[in-house]
């Protein structure tokens, strides 16, 4: 089995700040100084959490204005989801590709009904690559055999509509490729948007084809993005005099502890997953109480 780029040690790592490196590692990320981006590692704590649609619904309230594009398909008798995200994650512009497999079906009363997915294991990793462009200009490129291929550029402010991901994914075999292509078509992609070669599929994620979260509205997006742009402007103003990342971090630590702490919480933070988990637990509790009440009523009616 071929190894990922992280396993081969092909990606440069380290910000030059030992404390920050440790905090970033605990957060599940590493730093690529060649492209000046952060990216998720192979086995971060996020890999144990899983995913469902509620994740995308809580993104905007937590300051992340991002387009999402979940693609669903069935392969080997199992439900799969390969999802793409791009946009503004608080203080960073970034994007993601995540690959997940069905874990269980959730039915949380009126709050949520749908499939809960878990990340794939190492035997199912897929070769992926993308270039993230902003207004036609490349921001960064990521490539590797992975389950969660991400990139985040600190202090860069973007509207999701300014960003385009040029994506290529190599599937396990032709059967999986065809299933994935069917999922893309079902989501609204036309044949003219898809380029197929062997087991690989190449396409562009620009304007989402799928329904976006209900929490994304014009008014709330504008409000949250105003805050995000202010944060990015503050970051740029403080770090502009410095031409290397360690000096920028030191300046942030001295002049803006608030921004410094945000640097250590890039991407989808632990708070994001904690809020999601809380929703699931509360929903399960309410569902169990509801089921208990129904059963008690049935007993009284007998």
Image (tube, grey):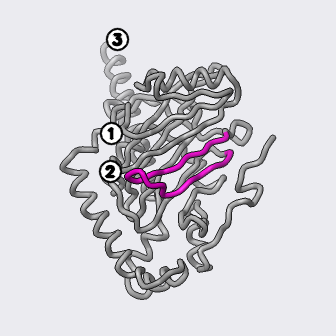
Q: Residue at x 58, y 61 (%)?
A: 29
| Element carrying mark 1 | loop
Q: Nearer the viewer, residue 115 or 143?
A: 143
Which image quadrant for residue 82?
Answer: top right
Labels 2 and 1 touching (C-beta < 8 A): yes
Q: Is residue 152 left or right of 259 when viewed as pictured?
A: right
The dominant secondary structure in magenta is strand
Pinpoint residue 161: horizontal percent, then vertical percent. 33, 47
Q: Nearer the viewer, residue 109 or 166?
A: 166
Q: Is residue 234 left or right of 116 when viewed as pictured?
A: left
Pinpoint residue 23: horizontal percent, then vertical percent. 56, 71
Considering only order in the chain, which callout, 1 or 2, is on the residue closer to the N terminus? 2
- For residue 136: magenta? yes
Point out the stretch of residues depicted in magenta: 127-145
| Residue 285 visible in this rendered orientation of the protein | no
Query: Which label number is shown at residue 213?
Result: 1
| Residue 161 visible in this rendered orientation of the protein | yes
- Quadrant containing the N terminus is top right
Considering only order in the chain, which callout, 2 or 3, is on the residue closer to the N terminus? 2
Which image quadrant for residue 156?
Answer: bottom left
Pinpoint residue 7: horizontal percent, then vertical percent. 75, 55
Disc 1 from disc 3: Cα separation: 44 Å
């Amino acid at each position: 089995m071929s190894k990922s780029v992280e396993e081969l040690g092909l990606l440069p790592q380290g910000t030059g700040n030992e404390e920050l490196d440790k905090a970033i590692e605990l957060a599940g990320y590493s730093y690529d100084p060649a492209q000046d981006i952060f990216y998720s590692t192979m086995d971060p704590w996020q890999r144990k959490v899983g995913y469902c649609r509620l994740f995308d619904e809580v993104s905007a309230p937590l300051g992340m204005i991002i387009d999402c594009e979940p693609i669903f398909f069935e392969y080997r008798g199992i439900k799969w989801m390969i999802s793409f995200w791009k946009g503004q994650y608080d203080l960073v512009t970034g994007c993601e590709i995540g690959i997940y497999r069905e874990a269980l079906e959730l039915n949380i009363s009126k709050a949520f009904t749908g499939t809960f997915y878990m990340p794939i294991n190492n035997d199912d990793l897929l070769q992926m690559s993308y270039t993230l462009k902003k207004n036609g200009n490349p921001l960064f490129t990521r490539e590797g055999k992975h389950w969660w291929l991400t990139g985040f550029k600190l202090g860069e402010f973007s509207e999701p509509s300014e960003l385009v991901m040029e994506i290529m994914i190599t599937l396990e075999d032709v059967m999986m490729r065809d299933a994935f292509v069917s999922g893309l078509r079902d989501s609204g992609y036309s044949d003219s948007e898809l380029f197929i070669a062997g087991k690989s599929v190449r396409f562009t994620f620009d304007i989402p084809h799928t329904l976006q979260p209900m929490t994304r509205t014009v008014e709330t997006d504008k409000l949250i993005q105003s805050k995000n742009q202010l944060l990015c402007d503050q970051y740029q103003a403080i770090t502009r005099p410095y031409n290397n990342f360690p000096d920028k971090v030191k300046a942030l630590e001295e002049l803006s502890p608030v921004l410094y702490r945000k640097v250590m919480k890039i991407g989808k933070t632990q708070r994001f997953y904690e809020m999601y988990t809380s929703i699931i637990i509360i929903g399960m509790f309410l569902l169990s109480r509801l089921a208990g009440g129904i059963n008690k009523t049935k007993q009284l009616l007998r």
